[in-house]
Amino acid sequence: MAAGKRIFTDEYVGSLCRKYDRRPEYTRPGLYNLATGDAYAGERAWIEGCIADLASYEEAVRIGGLIARLRSADNHREASNELRAFAALRERGFKPRYELDFDGRTPDWYVEPSGNTSGFVVECITANVSDEMGKHAAKMTELFKRIVEKARHCGANDLGVFLHYREGACLDQPTCKRISQEFEKWWRTAPVLGSMREVEGILFEVVGGGAAMQYYQPWWNYDALRCSIKEKTDRYANACWPRKLPLVVAVVPGRGYWLTTWDFQVHQGFLEEAHVFPSATALVTDESGRWEMKLIHNPNALYPLPVGALAEDISP
């Protein structure tokens, strides 16, 4: 077993500080902020708690691989979203095993049988923003960090700001610099709650919430989501079929992003054709601090999951 394994050790956090402390705040990766920021202490504790829970029964080598991914700026988001699926499964009393080998395939989670529910496989997808937003996501992140820096310098008091991106807005370096300068001038006028100001296609809206400002809400690339569901199904169906294992493809937006169950049901798309896999798709949601999986069952499933096995179902 891998008891005692931790993510955010002093040695690891120190290495991040040595690498990024001297860089401007808006150029640091989100993982740096997660590892060092007081505002993220709860998130760090949640991640450490998940790892401790998993380590209480999982093999050390598997835990080591997951920890390496959680410590990687390139892989952290996907790995932490896998933990959200893990948390949703544990919330329902299941025992998920990490990346067991099925004839060369290593799905994210194999869930051991429990009660009236047979064992099943869960493979996770991190939901992606639309192509239009995807082109600008990094630039929006940089702009957002510039805005946070300006607001902290001016004094944010008890207010925060939503940044809304208008399609077609230019986000090159000179434009972002002008936008952040105009924001600083506007913020110094002490705008009241509900005030708005648009600068070159970026709309600022004053909201409650303090200096921990809120990011824009993206819209989703549903075509890519449907393709990802099909890709995951094709990849793991052959591993599940001979073992008579249900396959659940779980979509995880992650913290700070919203995908409604209605949108998910309308756009996920696999019910349109008579495929026997996956057994269900699932939307992983944060329900008042608890992660839940909400399932859309495949009526043609070769190996169906019982209705209500994981949580409230979106559709039977």
Image (cartoon, rainbow, N blue to C red):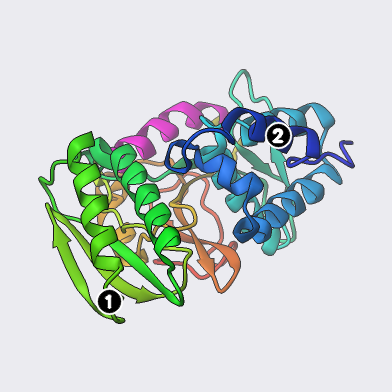
| Quadrant occupied by the N terminus | top right
Magenta region, main secondary structure = helix
* Circles 2, 1 touching at the beta carbon (< 8 Å): no
Measure how far apart labels 2 and 1 are at the Cα level.
44 Å
The residue nearer to you, when weighing 239 against 196, is 196
Badge 2 or badge 1: first in the primary sequence? 2
The amino acid at mark 1 is Pro
Q: Is residue 29 among the parts visible in the rendering?
A: yes
Can I make out residue 246 in this image? no
Residue at image coords 76%, 54%: 49
Horizontal side of residue 50 vs 245, given as left or right: right
Report the mark closest to the observer, 2 or 1. Answer: 1
Residue 191 tag number: 1
- Horizontal and vertical percent position of residue 311: 56, 67
Stretch of the chain drawn in magenta = 224-240
**Which part of the image, by quadrant, shows the C terminus?**
bottom left
Label 1 neighbour load within 10 Å: few <14, some 14-19, many 20+: some
Residue 22: name its quadrant: top right
Residue at (57%, 46%) from the top-left corner?
A: 33
Give the residue at x 45% y 41%: 125
At label 2, the amino acid type is Ile
Q: Is residue 8 left or right of residue 229?
A: right
Tell me where residue 82 appears, x and y as whole percent. 58, 44
Badge 2 element: helix
Question: Is residue 238 found inside the magenta-colored segment of the image?
Answer: yes
Q: Which residue is mark 2?
A: 67
